[in-house]
């Protein structure tokens, strides 16, 4: 199949899994090559012997050209020659350093009484995201559905929402502190502001994309306005709404970075900011990767859940359903010489 | 959820008698500066509890700490004397009740190799955050070298980006405080701090400022708050306990103690007695808080940080420190 | 469809209006039945990009109880607009529609509709799709479900009650759609080219199915198609429209006796009706298509004809 039609064809499951793993291993390989192969990149010199140069210190990083120039000058002046080995800039940390940072971050007991373990900081961050996203969704999704369903609701809401959407959520930081205090509440509020307005527009658009034919069919079956919204628009758009929310949840993580410096500093992204200030980039990458893992895992779980929740939409049914599908397909041929499972794309 | 809890707390608070209200902890917002992370020592050692006052230290970024103070969400905040005036001009009147330290080298003008003094900056580009203390530091240095602001070209640069900007060679020098100034020195080999706050002691005082309201209603508690400060300074001065103190401060900042120790050298801690002398002196110039604040005030007005000069005498109150000293 | 072939055999065919006594008697009985659906001077204008467009003009027509009427016409004659107005999904610009003598406005369960694109609710099982109309009438519980199952039985899909629409073939989906439209007991079943997307074999089966259903259910059917043979096979009367604007061209009483079967396609009545429809839909007067200016791209002697 894929040989003569290389585009958009389904891969066999084994190959799919293999490529999925390679998708992670490949960047790791590139990262490792640049970290451990000394002649790849490594644009700095890490000083091992200052040889009396006043401004050089052991372990200081110097650009290669500058170091070469210095060596030349010293040689010309017949002075001791400083030594060093090739190294990467401070912001480029090798995998093992990041892995070590990740491990230490989790295993180091907080030094100060009342301070949090890393996993507790993470829990705070996740709690912030959770409440921010939940509050936003509780208002944003119903409002978006109304806007998608009724033109009047859309006109009354969307121009203003569109207007506020362009206001950067971080700009509301001081105001949120004034209203909600300094703890978790203003952070949650920032996430709500960052998510809500996008959410209304995205949800409204998704609801508007529902096939008008379904609404017409329902109307000819006697469905009234309320039923059209609750029994047709809502279930028809639910799988897409679910995916919208998955994407918006990803955005909420972006707002967490600004939310966590509002009010009392806390959570995983504050950790990133603080470590970046002191240029502890191994810690920075460890935390970023951690967020990546959390986000990716959440999304995979939600995706898996979505495929089960909306099985009717899934073109590849679960193994269980596929088995029965085949069973019935076989009987169908006996009972009705219809062509089973004709692709609906022909319409 | 916390909303519910805080709503309940507010209800309870209004419902209860004033005595219950007084029992609430003093909420102090602090941020990453050696003079202020030192407060964590008192907290961790339980010295405030010993002194009979309940203090809640709240860890912030510097900017958001002032926002929280302006919003009335905390009773006190740690700021430079100049920023105390900025906060007051922004509507949040405040009173400095003690000085923690003055910057003694942590604020720097860092120049690329080949530039060895402030005088060499004539006609050069300097990356600086306009209206901030490093700007004031630069002007002070230029003045001493017989130059003015007009003799250099200022390139507005956020302080946390100054290391990269200096490394990119777009400017000849930058102004920054720690840890950015140290990073700039590391980022550009051969670069040099040509002028620092150590050259002008008293240019930047660091203080604990409180709301006038809290000062009026809970003065006795604030006196207790101050009373532990000399123990903190002594803890850091004593070679036997210094390491323990730095460990606590570094942990608060989230960095390695060895790394953090370097910043202490650029910070001149002030005992209560030293602080009191500076607060009560009426001399002009950087030797007194009033003199330093007047210079900072004029600078802020000139650079459009705020429009009207602030009332300096009401911006601090040396009497609390005096009370502690008298008891001793 | 070659018009030459038609004209050569024309002389041997009877007049399409000639009816056998049995057929004539049937039409007489049919006309006695009460009028279910009445179209009164129905017209529809749209505002197009280049000014107003008249899609339908002055359509007046009556459909009797349990009659099977097909509507055919060239593309652009407004067939779909017509059926959408009958369903209440579109508002007429002039004239009105009467159902059992009462004017209708808006869609309602008294006029069931089957769409070309199935429009089954993909999130509901086959049974729940059929149940939908009943629930809209406020019915629920075991009796409603039993009734829905009966409708599925009628279209031969009882075994697929718990399947989702996307597990079914096109023909099966359309059978569900018919069951769903019939479940609320409509007076009229409106069908908008329902078999247009099906392959020839499935389509033939569906036509047989539909006739079977129609025989067993008290319902009047108005069926739109562009397939002339389908119209003759199914209809009592065929409403032929012409385009620009859409107007009634002719109403043909199909002389082919009932019950119908595919074998009748060779009968003289069928052929005569077929020829008449051809004349109406593809008029011979129209200029013959110009031969394409084709350059020979094969080698000389390499001929396929």
Image (spheres, coloured by chain):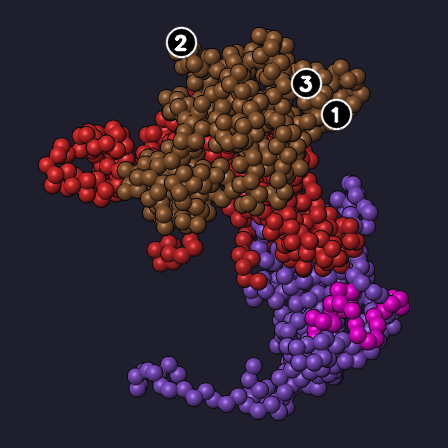
Callout 3: chain: B
The quadrant holding residue C208 is bottom right
Circle 2 Cα neighbour tier, 10 Å, few/some/many (<14 / 14–19 / ≥20): few
* Marks 1/2: CA–CA distance: 45 Å
Relative to C301, is B81 on the left or the right?
Answer: right
Q: Secondary structure at mark 2?
A: helix
- Residue B252 included in the magenta stretch of the image: no
Chain C, chosen colour in render: purple
Which disc is residue B219 wearing?
3
Q: Nearer the viewer, residue B95 or A330?
A: B95
Place of residue B97 in the rendered image (x, y in percent of width and height, measured from the top left): 60, 22
Magenta stretch in the rendered image: C78-103
Query: Which quadrant holds the N terminus of chain B?
Result: top right
Q: Residue at x 71, y 55 (%)?
A: A154
- Residue C82 included in the magenta stretch of the image: yes
Q: Which chain is brown?
A: B
Place of residue A1 in the rendered image (x, y in percent of width and height, measured from the top left): 38, 54
Place of residue B211 in the rendered image (x, y in percent of width and height, measured from the top left): 66, 27
The label nearer to you, 3 versus 1, is 3
Callout 1: chain: B
Q: Secondary structure at mark 3?
A: helix
């Amino acid at each position: 199949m894929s040989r003569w039609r290389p585009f958009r064809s389904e891969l066999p499951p084994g190959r799919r899994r293999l490529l999925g793993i390679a998708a992670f291993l490949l960047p790791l390989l590139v990262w490792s090559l640049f970290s451990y192969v000394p002649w790849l990149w490594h644009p700095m010199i890490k000083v091992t012997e200052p040889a009396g140069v006043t401004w050089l210190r052991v372990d200081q990083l110097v650009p290669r050209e500058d170091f070469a120039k210095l060596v030349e000058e010293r040689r010309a002046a017949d002075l001791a020659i400083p030594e060093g080995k090739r190294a990467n800039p401070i912001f480029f940390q090798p995998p093992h350093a990041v892995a070590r940072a990740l491990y230490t971050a989790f295993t180091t007991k907080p030094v100060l009484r009342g301070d949090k373990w890393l996993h507790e900081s993470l829990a705070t961050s996740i709690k912030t995201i959770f409440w921010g996203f939940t509050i936003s969704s509780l208002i944003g999704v119903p409002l978006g559905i109304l806007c998608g369903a009724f033109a009047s609701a859309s006109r009354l809401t969307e121009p203003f929402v569109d207007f506020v959407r362009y206001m950067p959520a971080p700009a509301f930081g001081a105001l949120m502190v004034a209203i909600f205090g300094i703890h978790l509440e203003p952070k949650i509020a920032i996430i709500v502001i960052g998510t809500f307005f996008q959410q209304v527009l995205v949800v409204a658009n998704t609801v508007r994309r529902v096939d008008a034919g379904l609404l017409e069919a329902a109307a000819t079956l006697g469905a009234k306005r309320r039923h059209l919204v609750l029994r047709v628009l809502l279930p028809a758009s639910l799988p897409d709404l679910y995916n919208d929310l998955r994407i918006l949840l990803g955005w909420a993580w972006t707002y967490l970075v600004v939310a966590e410096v509002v009010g009392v500093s806390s959570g995983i992204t504050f950790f990133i900011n603080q470590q970046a200030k002191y240029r502890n980039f191994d810690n920075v990458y460890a935390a970023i990767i951690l967020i990546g893992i959390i986000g990716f895992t959440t999304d995979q779980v939600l995706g898996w859940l979505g495929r089960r929740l909306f099985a009717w939409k899934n073109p590849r049914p679960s193994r269980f359903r596929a088995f029965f599908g085949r069973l019935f397909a076989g009987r169908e041929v006996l009972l009705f010489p219809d062509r089973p499972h004709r692709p609906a794309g022909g319409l | 959820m916390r909303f519910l809890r805080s709503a309940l707390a507010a209800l309870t608070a209004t419902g209860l008698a004033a005595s219950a209200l007084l029992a609430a902890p003093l909420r102090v917002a602090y941020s990453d500066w050696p003079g202020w992370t030192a407060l964590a020592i008192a907290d961790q050692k339980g010295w405030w509890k010993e002194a009979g006052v309940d203090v809640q230290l709240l860890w912030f970024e510097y900017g958001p700490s002032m926002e929280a103070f302006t919003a009335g969400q905390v009773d006190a905040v740690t700021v430079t004397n100049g920023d105390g005036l900025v906060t007051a001009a922004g509507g949040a009147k405040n009173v400095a009740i003690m000085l923690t330290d003055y910057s003694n080298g942590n604020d720097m003008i860092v120049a690329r190799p080949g530039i060895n003094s402030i005088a060499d900056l004539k006609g050069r580009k300097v990356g600086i955050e306009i209206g901030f203390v490093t700007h004031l530091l630069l002007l002070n240095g230029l003045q001493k070298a017989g130059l003015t602001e007009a003799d250099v070209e200022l390139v507005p640069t956020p302080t946390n980006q100054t290391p990269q900007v200096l490394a990119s060679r777009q400017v000849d020098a930058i102004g920054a405080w720690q840890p950015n100034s140290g990073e700039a020195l590391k980022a550009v080999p051969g670069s040099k701090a040509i002028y620092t706050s150590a050259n002008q002691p008293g240019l930047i005082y660091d203080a604990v400022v409180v709301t006038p309201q809290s000062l009026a209603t809970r003065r006795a508690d604030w006196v207790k708050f101050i009373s532990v400060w000399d123990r903190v300074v002594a803890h850091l001065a004593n070679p036997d306990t210094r390491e323990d103190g730095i460990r606590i401060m570094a942990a608060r900042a989230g960095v390695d103690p060895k790394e953090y120790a370097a910043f202490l050298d650029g910070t001149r801690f002030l005992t209560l007695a030293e602080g009191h002398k500076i607060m009560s002196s009426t001399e002009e110039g950087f030797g007194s808080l009033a003199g330093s604040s007047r210079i900072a005030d004029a600078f802020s007005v000139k650079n459009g940080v705020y429009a009207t000069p602030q009332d300096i005498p009401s911006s601090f109150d040396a009497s609390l420190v005096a009370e502690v000293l008298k008891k001793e | 469809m070659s018009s030459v072939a038609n004209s050569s055999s024309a002389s041997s065919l009877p007049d399409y209006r000639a009816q056998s006594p049995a057929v004539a008697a049937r039409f007489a009985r049919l006309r006695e039945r009460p009028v279910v659906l009445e179209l009164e001077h129905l017209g529809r204008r749209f505002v197009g990009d280049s000014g107003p467009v008249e899609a339908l003009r002055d359509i007046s027509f009556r459909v009797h109880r349990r009659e099977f009427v097909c509507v055919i016409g060239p593309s652009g004659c407004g067939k779909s607009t017509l059926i959408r107005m009958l369903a209440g999904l579109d508002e007429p610009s002039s004239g009105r529609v009467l159902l059992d003598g009462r004017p209708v406005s808006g869609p309602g369960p008294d006029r069931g509709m089957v769409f070309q694109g199935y429009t089954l609710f993909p999130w509901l099982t086959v049974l729940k799709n059929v149940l939908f109309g009943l629930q809209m009438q406020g019915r629920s519980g075991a009796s409603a479900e039993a009734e829905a199952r009966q409708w599925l039985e009628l279209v031969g899909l009882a075994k697929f009650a718990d399947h989702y629409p996307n597990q079914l073939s096109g023909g099966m989906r359309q059978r569900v759609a018919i069951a769903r439209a019939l479940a609320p007991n409509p007076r009229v079943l409106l069908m908008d080219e329902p078999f247009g997307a099906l392959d020839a074999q499935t389509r033939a089966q569906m036509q047989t199915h539909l006739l079977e259903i129609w025989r067993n259910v008290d319902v009047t059917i108005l069926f739109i198609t562009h397939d002339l043979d389908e119209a003759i096979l199914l209809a009592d009367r065929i409403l032929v429209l012409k385009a620009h604007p859409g107007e009634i061209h002719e109403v043909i009483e199909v002389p082919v006796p009932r019950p119908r079967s595919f074998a009748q396609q060779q009968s003289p009545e069928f052929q005569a009706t077929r020829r008449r429809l051809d004349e109406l839909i593809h008029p011979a007067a129209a200029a013959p298509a110009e031969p394409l200016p084709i350059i020979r791209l094969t080698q000389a002697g390499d001929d396929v004809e």
